[in-house]
Every structure is written in C-alpha cells, then in structure tokens.
Image (cartoon, grey):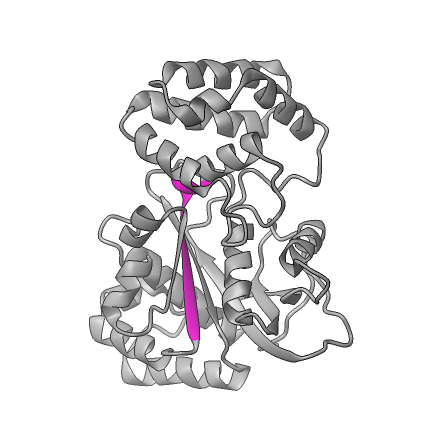
Amino acid sequence: MVGMARVLQGGLLPAAARPGAVVEIACDESGFSGTNLLDPASPVITHASVDLSTGEAVKLIAEVRGRFPFAPYELKSGKFLRRPQALEWFLGALHGRSHVHAVDKELFLVTRIVDLLLGEPSYAAGTCLAQRHRSAALALYQAGREAGDDWTAFLTAFVDLAREKRRRPVERFLRARDALPGHAVLSELTDDRVWTLAARLDSDDRSLPPPLEPLLPALAETVLFWSRGDRQVLVTHDEQSALTAGRLVRLQQALAGGDGPSPLAGLTMADSRQDPRVQVADLLAGAARRSGSDGRSDAARRSGSAESADPTKSADSAKSAG
C-alpha cells in the first residue's frame, strides 16, 4: 500500500509517547555503494530528506507527470537532468520542504581513520557533534591527495583492515602508512594504535561506529538538521541493510547528548516504489548527486567530509549539493 512503512532489516521503533514537537521526514540516498568507498565512478553519496505528507508527495509526483511527459514507470533523477525545466520546477516545489546532505566518500574514509586511531569515537563521529579531530583529518586528506598511488594504497589498506581479520591486513596498512611522505598526523597513527584497533574490530566491538558506513553519519546530520535543537524526528527511510536496529539504537543514544530525549525518535523502512514521500527523496538525492560537473561536490571539497544544503533555491543549488 502507498505510504506503508515497516521495520525491515533493522529500523528503530518509535516510543509510544514522545514529548514535545515532532517532525516526520522521508529519506533516500544516491551513490551508496556499501563498503566500496573508493569507486571512482561514485565518489559522493547524497542523502536527501523531505517533510512532505503522503498526500503532498502524491500530488507533487502527479503534477510532475502532468507538466512534463515521462514514462509511466517510476521516475528517475537522470530524466530530470535531461529536462532542465522539469528539474527547476521540481526543486522550486520543494523549496523549504527538503534537505540534502552530501558526503565525500574519500574524505569520510580519512575522517574514520583519524577518529578511530586518535580517539575513542562514538556514533556521533563524522558529524558536527564530534569536531575534535576534524582539522587533523582535513590536513591528512589534503596532503595525501598529492601522494598519488601511495595514497590510494593507504586508503585501500585501511578498507582491507576494516573488512578482514588476522595480521596480514594490519601489516599491509602499516607498510602503506610508511610509504607516504612524512606528516604530523601519520606520525600519530602508531603501530600500537593500529594493532589495538584491529583487535577491537576482530572482536566485533559494537561500541565502535562501523568504519565503512557513511550512511550513518549522513542520517545523523539529517536528523540534526530537521530537529533544529528542539524537535524530535521520525524517519521513514528507503530500505537499507546498513541501518540495523543495533546501530540505530547506538546512534539514537549518541545524538541524545545530555539527559533530554534524542532527536531521533524512530525510523521505519519503506520502498520508494510504494511510498511517494520516499520516491520524492530518491529523485532529489539522485538529482543532487548527478548534477555535479565531475560527480564530486565542490562544497564537500572545501568544507570536509560532508556538506548540507537546501537544494531547492534554484536548479543550480543541486549542483552545489551533489
């Protein structure tokens, strides 16, 4: 049924009673490639959200079809990009009702390396709530990109370290670290810290945020945006195996901060083909990602692993977010 959502492959059931104001949003992403964070064809993930009701989303999709002839099957963002007038109208219709968060996957990976090896990261790592090591991550990212193949080998070695057990991936990562030009941040990534992290990963330490899952901090930033400091957020999200119940509980706790309620009130899964709100978010995420001139957000380059934007101010805004 249209608009039906359910807990599937995870999710987070909302509490029966929620004090204070609550906003309901629907989310989807574009560019998510699981733990394959070094795919040159997909360097950015965009996470889009809208606060439309089901009726508003149905009306919006119907109006898109009425104004601009598309095939009768599910709309795709690529079709919008070939129809600038349709894209501009769509973004204008969502003005003030949507949000896009873009994540540079490579910089996310560098941020994870620094957070996991230089501190005790929580599920708030990689968000605006955890900025302690951000400058170090940016410095390493900027220096590393000048190292060419050695930099790629370093990042690949970390991905292998996060995926595999036993000592060989650790030794490969240490060799890749040593092959890079000297840098202050690299000198702090000591052998002991790397071995300690590997042991925690091997033991499946659930207190560590998943090293290769950019969707979790993207969701966190989305919730923080819509919360605006004083609202709880109920999320309907396109089906994603990364959003397990355990991870969402830990994310909810990390976002709570003090003694007050967490801004993340709950999350249920829905299929974009069945939920028009998620379909609108899917179109927005895809348009924002694909409209970048080279697939990587200029804003993400400038500011770090992620950039939040209101992409609905003009058609060009999607380019800055994507």
**On the picture, is 177 further left or further right than 146?**
right
- 123 with respect to 92 (left or right): right
| Above or below for 279 versus 9 | below
Name the main secondary structure of what is drawn in magenta. Answer: strand
Which quadrant is the N terminus positioned in? bottom right
Q: Residue 255's x, y, as percent?
A: 63, 58
Asked whether residue 54 is in view, the answer is yes
The residue positioned 43% from the left and 73% from the top of the image is 98
Check the image and report above or below for 108 versus 160. below
Q: Is residue 195 magenta?
A: no
At x 30%, y 47%, the residue is 301
Nearer to us in this view, 19 or 12 = 19
Q: Quadrant of residue 89?
A: bottom left
Residue at image location 40% in from the left, 62% down from the top: 285
Magenta segment: 98-108
Front residue of 276/164: it is 164
